[in-house]
Image (tube, rainbow, N blue to C red):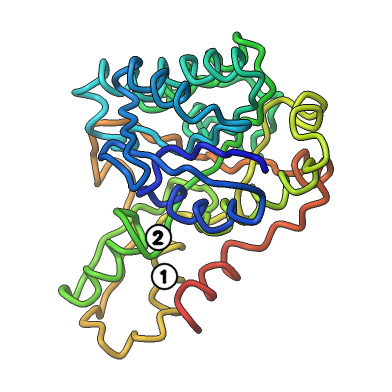
Amino acid sequence: MTRILLTGSTGQVGWELQRTLMTLGEVIAVGREISSCGLLMDLSQPDTIRHVIREVQPDLIVNPAAYTAVDKAESEPELAMAVNGTAPGVIAEAAKQLGAGVIHYSTDYVFNGHQATPYTEQDEPEPQNIYGKTKLAGEKAIQAVGVPHLILRTSWLYGLRGKNFLLTMLKLAREREELKVVDDQVGAPTWSRMIAEFTAQILSQGTQDLIGFLNKNSGIYHLTASGQTSWYGFAKAIFEFDSKRSEHKLKNLLAISSQQYPTPATRPAYSSLDTQKISRTFGLALPSWQRNLELVLGS
């Protein structure tokens, strides 16, 4: 049976992956706290990474764990780089020694946002904030090791657990009569469960020879819901699709510019990702962001 080591098991994507990966083998889920298997993996501490991988002896390492506080990263660049930039390389090196493969998740924020058409995997990254720079460093670290791998870039993650835009909007709609939301940043809201389900679908295609499958298909892929919108458009749809909207106090939703809502980290104005490569390679039909949001909110 395939042994799968899953990092970040309490995060948005990690939580969902625990369920979807169970169909593919034995899942050993770890995080910064001691897990049920008695192991702890802190990505800011390389020795804990190496120790856990030696103990588990996995065939596959799936790494959704990351430093995701985009604004806080501006004041904690060393920690963000340790988790997002250095740790993936340590994981890749340990995996290569075992003959294992790696699945790693990255972000649309590796791009500068200056385009007006969706970014492909061939477009040159130019991150505009510390978070994006550290995530790009992690991608390069894995590629430099040469381990069989898939790097899956996603965007605007949300779900019904953790901290994300969806849950923030639902909370504020029940507390406030007016909300102002940025309308000049465009991307693809993507459900964490969709990421987990499509990851499992991809891996299920290589169950006969997982490492051979990863070797053949190693590289970067864009995995997001189809379509695009602004944060304002996303918020508007959240309130329309919410089956509990009768509980909202919200009366006015106002569109504002990024200049009217300054943040420590610069966000790309446009970060929609072209997903044709992943659809073509693995035969995936990616749902629209609106359809996923309907499913999440139970409409």
Contact, CB < 8 Å: mark 1 with mark 2?
yes
Residue 209 percent across, percent down from the top left: 81, 34
- Give the alpha-carbon distance from disc 1 to disc 2, as whole Å: 6 Å
Q: Which of the 4 image quarters holds residue 172?
A: bottom left
At x 34% / y 39%, what residue is drawn? 31
At x 30% / y 22%, what residue is drawn? 44
Q: Horizontal placement of 76 versus 47: left or right?
A: left
Q: Which of the 4 image quarters holds residue 119?
A: top right
Q: Secondary structure at mark 2?
A: helix
Q: Quadrant of the N terminus?
A: top right
Q: Circle 2 is placed at which residue position?
A: 232
Residue 219 percent across, percent down from the top left: 70, 25
Q: Horizontal placement of 182 versus 24: left or right?
A: left
| Frontmost residue, 169 versus 213 | 213
Q: Using the image, determine if residue 119 lies above or below residue 83.
A: below
Q: Horizontal placement of 214 versus 133: left or right?
A: right
Q: Circle 1 is placed at which residue position?
A: 236
| Frontmost residue, 256 versus 277 | 277
Residue 165 percent across, percent down from the top left: 34, 57
At x 29% / y 19%, what residue is drawn? 45
| Frontmost residue, 26 versus 191 | 26
| Frontmost residue, 276 versus 184 | 276
Residue type at mark 2: give it.
Tyr
Q: Could you classify mark 2 by the number of other residues whose Cα lies within 10 Å: few (under 14), some (14-19), or many (20 or more)?
A: many
Q: Horizontal placement of 191 versus 206: left or right?
A: left
Residue 182 percent across, percent down from the top left: 35, 52
